[in-house]
Amino acid sequence: MSRIGIVCDSTCDLGYPWLAEQHDMAMVPLKVLFGEETFLDWIDLTPEMFFERLEKADVLPKTSQPSPSDFTGEYARLADAGCTGIVSVHLTGALSGTIQSAHMAAEHAAIPVRVVDTKMASAGVAICVEAALRARDAGADLDGVEAAARDVAEASRLLFALDTLEYLVKGGRAGKAQGLAATVLNIKPILTFNDEGTIEPFKKVKGTRKAITEIAAQAAADAAGRPLVIAILHSMAPGLADELRGALDAAGVSYDLRHTTEVGAAIGTYAGRRAIGLVYYPAT
């Protein structure tokens, strides 16, 4: 009988309290560098600790991907625990070399490892991890668990708005949204991830409240009367998450909220405070 382990990286922003409740699972952290100091995302820095430090920093932090050996250790641990295969689910390879490290470690693992590029980040990764866990716990084999994560990644749309593009641009992760950095007059571009996993503009609106309304309206349009599976992300802005749920209700969206994820240090390095976003796919 198959026993499938699930591995993710810390950019899923699910945090340790939730992850600790899952069996045969591991989270590999990215590193966040403030000058000469290095911290492990979600281990050494909670979101509160990170954003407090960010506001006081003279120089913006940088992030560093896990090494192949970081993944090798977790793959070996799960194999030693009795897992017969592993599905490793990660943030977009277009923005990070994390998935390359996972692939390199997978080549030398003692058991089969399937590496999934979600081509998203934060709640976008979380919703794929959650799909893999549900399939695994329902008795799916290695192929089935991998397919569950890939199918959700391909079916999902992630829309998000940032309070400022400063961190995204200075961190070199703006992608096709680079040209929006000079926007003024409270213009809040709604951003998305394209099929290549690169960030690109979706729509420009004026103000965060309008951005939330537009995100909900697009979800309603894509739902076309069908229920959605959703996850919400925010960075130190639970009030915005509540507003987004209210906007979805007002737009008449029927949804199953799987997670509300708080942006951690690795994603927060580029998102800054008061980011808000929604990932969704049609329920089956």
Image (cartoon, rainbow, N blue to C red):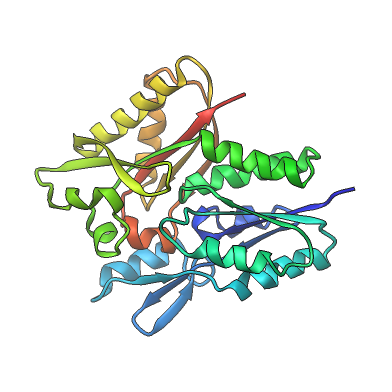
Q: Which residue sits at x=41%, y=67%?
A: 49
Q: Is residue 58 left or right of residue 226?
A: left
Considering the image in quadrants, where does the C terminus appear? Answer: top right
Q: Residue furthest top?
A: 225
x, y percentage for residue 269? 35, 63
Residue situated in front as seen by the camera: 284 or 252: 284
Q: Position of residue 220 (x, y in %)?
A: 40, 21
Q: Is residue 256 left or right of residue 61?
A: right
Q: Nearer the viewer, residue 211 or 82?
A: 82
* 111 on left or right of 74: right
Vertical position of residue 145 compared to residue 230: above or below = below
Query: Which residue is at the far bottom?
Result: 36
Q: Residue at x 54, y 60 (%)?
A: 99
- Number of numbered discs visible in the structure rendering: 0
Closer to the camera in the image, 81 or 65: 65
Residue at (40, 82) in percent of width and height: 37
Q: Position of residue 78 (x, y in %)?
A: 76, 64
Query: In the image, 269: left or right of 283?
Result: left
Image coordinates of residue 109 in percent, x first then y, are: 73, 67
- Quarter of image, res 244: top left
Work out which residue is located at the far front of the displayed protein and give it: 107
Quarter of the figure with residue 233? top left
Query: Which residue shows up at 75% across the image and 69% down it?
Result: 76
